[in-house]
Image (cartoon, grey):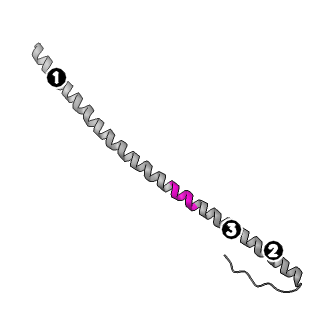
Amino acid sequence: MTDKKSDDRIEEQLNRLGIGLIKHLDERFAELSSRMDRFENRMSSLEGGIDTVLKNQETDVQERLAGNRQVDRHEDWIERAAPGLVPMPRSVV
């Protein structure tokens, strides 16, 4: 059988190991948390950039459609004003 001093020493060593392990895990989790925060910030920034590009693309499409409708109206007006006049071909956009 082991004596009381030996048991106390083993318990003290286990406590120190446990405290060291907890300290080590806390440091690692803090580092991981920091990395995750940086990753989330980067993803948020990319998401904002993609949203901006998509909104600009949507605006470009709407402006192109509005321009095409305006050209169609002008061609109709020209055809009514001067029947038989051949309109100039549109460039392909």
Q: Residue at x 39, y 49 (%)?
A: 38
Foreground disc of the pair 1, 3: 3
Residue at the spot of label 3: 63
* Visible residue check, residue 65: yes
Q: Secondary structure at mark 3?
A: helix
**Amino acid type shown at disc 1:** Glu
* Visible residue check, residue 2: no
Sequence-wise, which precedes: disc 2 or disc 1? 1
Residues in magenta, as a range = 47-53
Question: Hey, which quadrant is residue 76 in on the image?
Answer: bottom right
Looking at the image, is 72 positioned above or below residue 33?
below
Q: Secondary structure at mark 2?
A: helix
Q: Are marks 2 and 1 in contact (CB under 8 Å)?
A: no
Foreground disc of the pair 2, 1: 2
Q: Which of 4 and 58 lies nearest the eye of the viewer?
A: 58
Q: Position of residue 11 (x, y in %)?
A: 18, 21
